Amino acid sequence: MDSEVNEKAAVPHPSLSARGAERLRVRIWRGGESGEFQEFDVPRQESQTVLDVVTYVQRALEPTLAYRYACRVGMCGSCAMTVNGRAMWTCRTHVSKVVENGTVEIAPLHNLPVVRDLVTDMTSFFDKWARARGQFKGSKTRREDFARISPQSTGRRNIDAGIECIGCGVCYASCDVVTWNPEYLGPAALNRAWTLVNDVRDEVKRERLAAVAGDAGCNACHTHVTCSERCPKGIEPTAGIAGLKRMVFGAALKGEI
Amino acid sequence: MNTRTQVLLWAAQRVSGALLGLFVLVHLAVIIYAVRNGLTAGEILGRTRGNAGWASFYALFAFAVSIHASIGLRAVCTEVLGWQGRGRDFALLMFGVLLFAWGLRAVWAVTGA
Amino acid sequence: MTMKNDYRSHNHPAYWAFVVHRVSGVLLTLYLPVHFWALSQALQGEARLESFLKWTEQPLVKLGEVLLIVLLAAHLTGGVRLLMLEFLAWRGWQKNLLAGAAGATVVIGTAFLLNLL
């Protein structure tokens, strides 16, 4: 029994760095729309991610801290936050890539109402997805043959460039037009609409173009390209939005909008 | 203002911008030439007065810039001033008309006989 | 209101291109009525226009003119870049258009400046 206890005592706790004393100064937003940054002293670890840091703070230092995550491997899009001023996934961001002067500042995503601490209300983000008609609508049934679409076709390549979006909100949070124009649908919703107007199987292209046109739609984009800069999946909403501008222009000329 | 009109405003902004791209290059070349040769009022007016070519060019230039500037300001009003709606659109229409009128007056001053 | 982005998320070339384009556009729009007024002086005869041109020969005014030409060149080349981004299908090289736009701005501004020296 004694030797068992001694062996347990000899094994270092996982939260202690093998190098010993390296610490991280972490500032985390507390509160709602109004609030302040609270500082924590967190042990540094190799290959530590920002999500690891937030999780450590909530479990070991501040149990009342509210934050979201799920898969922690870059698949679900739940853990996006503002880190040192830039929106990103916290699960796939190594602290070593973002730390500035030994400090990491973590805030909720911008452009969205803050529920508490690091949690935002994503309702408007998904409402705009729906307003942009971001849902596929086909007409074929199981009794008909498959649609035949070449992966090399222009339409399919356009779709492939944007289809991997997991709705994390990073682009939306980074977009200044979203900040300045509350009605603006935003890069994610427009990117999804772009993947659908390029799909020959979809039946509501005309309605969708009408939904994404105008002051609240693609025409409001000023090509800041911040969305494309920040997208963790390397999607370029700017390109899709430019494509929508061209399609919408054509539709307006033809009187379809 | 319906969606179609909004799209056409966007289009007018781009088309007028493309035209202005050409007009401005011509205008810059003219200015650089004039400055290189030391411009006096007499020399300028000697070339432009009674010249239908310059009059047409600059009248079109004034028209394009009136469209481009007023639609350009429209986005600035929304995004910087938070000013939207009919009031803003009417004010910008008035500004565009005024700018065109001043521009035509300048064209007439320089090309009218 | 919701939290807003600060300078840290804006530190990339395309964003600065936007700022230059917007600022130059607004300044040029403010300048235009002045420009039209100046040319309209010719309505009162050649002598009136000539005296105005003499007034513009002051160094500060010349400097202002150079700045205006730079603003114009910047807005023009930035605008051409936008037209290419919006109307041509997306290509990677378009990111380099920014460099070309900035370069052309300097060239045109310099050409004008040289004429004054």
Image (cartoon, coloured by chain):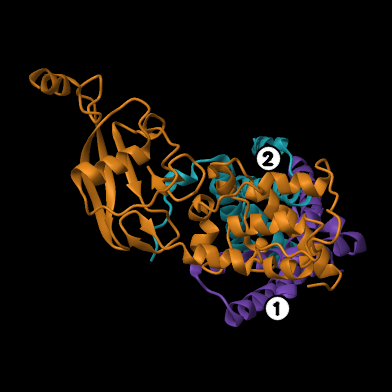
Chain colours: A orange, B purple, C cyan
Chain of the residue that carries numbered disc 1 in the rendered image: B
Against A233, is C68 above or below? below
Q: CA distance from mark 2 to mark 1?
A: 35 Å
Q: Which amino acid type is marked by label 1?
A: Asn
Task: State if disc 1 and disc 2 touch (CB < 8 Å).
Answer: no
Count residues near mark 2 (Cα–Cα under 10 Å), then give few for <14, some for 14-19, many for 20+. many
Residue B77 placement, left or right of A198: left
Residue B63 placement, left or right of C97: right
| Residue furthest to the front | A1
Dot label at residue A198: none
Q: Quadrant of residue A50?
A: top left
Count residues near mark 1 (Cα–Cα under 10 Å), then give few for <14, some for 14-19, many for 20+. few
Who's the residue at 30% across and 43% down the image? A55
Query: Measured from the top left, where is residue B109 in percent x and y?
Result: 78, 68
Who's the residue at 62% across and 49% down the image? C71
Residue on which the image places disc 1: B2
Work out which quarter of the rendered image holds the C terminus of chain B and state it: bottom right
Residue C50 placement, left or right of A130: right
Residue on which the image places disc 2: C101
Query: Measured from the top left, where is residue A240 in percent x and y?
Result: 69, 52
Who's the residue at 75% across and 47% down the image? A158
Who's the residue at 11% across and 19% down the image? A6
Query: Measured from the top left, where is residue A191 in percent x and y?
Result: 65, 54
Query: Measured from the top left, where is residue A27 in percent x and y?
Result: 27, 44
Chain of the residue that carries numbered disc 2 in the rendered image: C
